[in-house]
Image (spheres, helix red, strand yellow):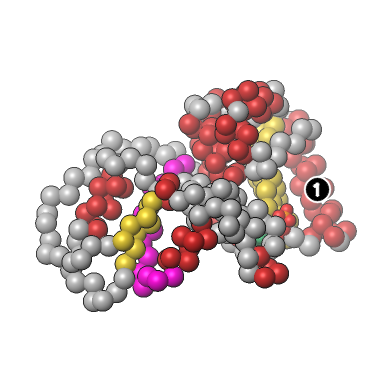
Amino acid sequence: MDIINISQRIKKIENNKDYFNEVIENINSSDAIIWAFPLYVFLVASQYKRFIELITEHSIEHVFKDKYTCVLTTSINFYDHTAHNYMHAVCDDLDMKYLGFYSAEMMDLLDEDGRKNMTTFSKNFFEDIKSNVNTAKRYIPITLQNFNYAPSINHMKRDKNSKKLVIISDSNNNDSNLSVMVEKFKNSFNGGIEFYNLNDIDIKGGCLGCLKCSYNNVCVYQGKDGFIDFYNELKDFDIVIFAGSLKGRYLSSKWTPPNNFFI
Ligand SMILES: Cc1cc2nc3c(=O)[nH]c(=O)nc-3n(C[C@H](O)[C@H](O)[C@H](O)COP(=O)(O)O)c2cc1C
C-alpha cells in the first residue's frame, strides 16, 4: 500500500509537473484509493481540497473512474458528516465505487474497541473489493448551466446606516457571474463598500494544524505573509459579506482550511 501525503506536498504537486504526473501515475496503477485526512473546520484541509480541484483542472477524472474507494478520518466527530458527505459526493462525481467511511474520534484508536472497529471496517473494505461488489451512487451529478447574470433593474440605493460593510471574494475573472453580482451589490449602497479579493492577499499556506497558536495566540505564519494583517483589518467592519463560487461542491480551496480564509 502506498501512502501519498497530498496535503504536505501540495505546493510540489501543484508546481512540479513531473511530480504531479508521478502522483497521478501512482493512483492510476492502484486498484483502490483510500481518502484519509484529519477533519479541519467541517471539511478536508484546503491543501486536500486543492488536490481535488487539480483533478478537474487537469481533466484526469478518468484516472479515478471505477476504482473502489473509502474514506478514513480522524476528528472530534464535530460535523464530520459534512466532510464525509462532501467526499462521498466527490467520489460519485469521479465515478468511483464508494464503499463507505470510517470516522474515528481522535482518541478512538487508543483503546482496543476502537482498534477492533477500524480493523473490521478495513476487512469489510478489502473483502468487498475481492468479491467485486456493486455500488450505487448517492448524489445527483453536477450539471453546469450556461447562464450569464445580467442585472437590469436599477433599484434605489440603500443607506448603510453608518455600518461599515466589506465584501470578500475569490473571483479571478471580472466577467464571471460572481464578479458581476458583487459589482451590483457594491453599487446598491450609498457611499460604496470596501472590497477584498483573496487572490490579492499574500497567503503563503493554509492552517497546518500545528496548534502553535494555542500557546500564545500567534500563528506560525505571523510576519511571513499578509494574512494576519488582512484578518486584523476585518475587525474594523460591522458586516462581512462572503462572495464565492462553488467549485466541485464547495467553495474553492482559497476559502477552505489551508490557503484558506476560514482558518
Ligand atoms: C484547525 C483545526 C480545526 C479542526 N476542526 C475540526 C472540525 O471541524 N470537526 C472535528 O470533528 N474536528 C476538528 N478538529 C479536530 C481534528 O480533526 C482532530 O484533532 C484530529 O484528530 C487531528 O488529526 P491530526 O493530529 O492528524 O491533525 C480540528 C482541529 C484543528 C487543529
| Picture layout, residue 158 above or below residue 199 | below
Residue 247, how many percent across, how many down?
44, 43
Q: In which quarter of the image is ligand 1?
A: bottom right
Q: What stretch is highlighted in magenta?
A: 235-250
* Side of 120 where 91 appears, left or right: left
| Picture layout, residue 187 above or below residue 128 | below
Location of residue 132 (image quadrant): top right
Asked if the residue at label 1 sits under 8 Å from ligand 1, the reply is no
Residue that label 1 marks: 120
Residue at the (18%, 45%) spot, across then down? 150
Residue 51 visible at all: yes
- Residue 203 highlighted magenta (yes or no): no
* Side of 229 where 9 appears, left or right: right
Residue 202, how many percent across, how many down?
49, 49
Residue at the (25%, 47%) spot, across then down? 180
Residue 46 visible at all: no
Residue at the (75%, 60%) spot, across then down? 106
Residue at the outermost right position:
112
For badge 1, the amino acid type reads Thr
* Side of 127 where 78 appears, left or right: left
Residue 108, how many percent across, how many down?
79, 60
| Picture layout, residue 187 above or below residue 44 | below
104, 181: nearer the viewer: 181
* Quarter of the image where the N terminus is located: top right
243, 68: nearer the viewer: 243
* Circle count: 1
Q: Disc 1 on helix, strand or loop?
A: helix
* Side of 144 where 50 appears, left or right: right
- Residue 244 highlighted magenta (yes or no): yes
* Quarter of the image where the C terminus is located: bottom right
| Picture layout, residue 60 above or below residue 138 | above
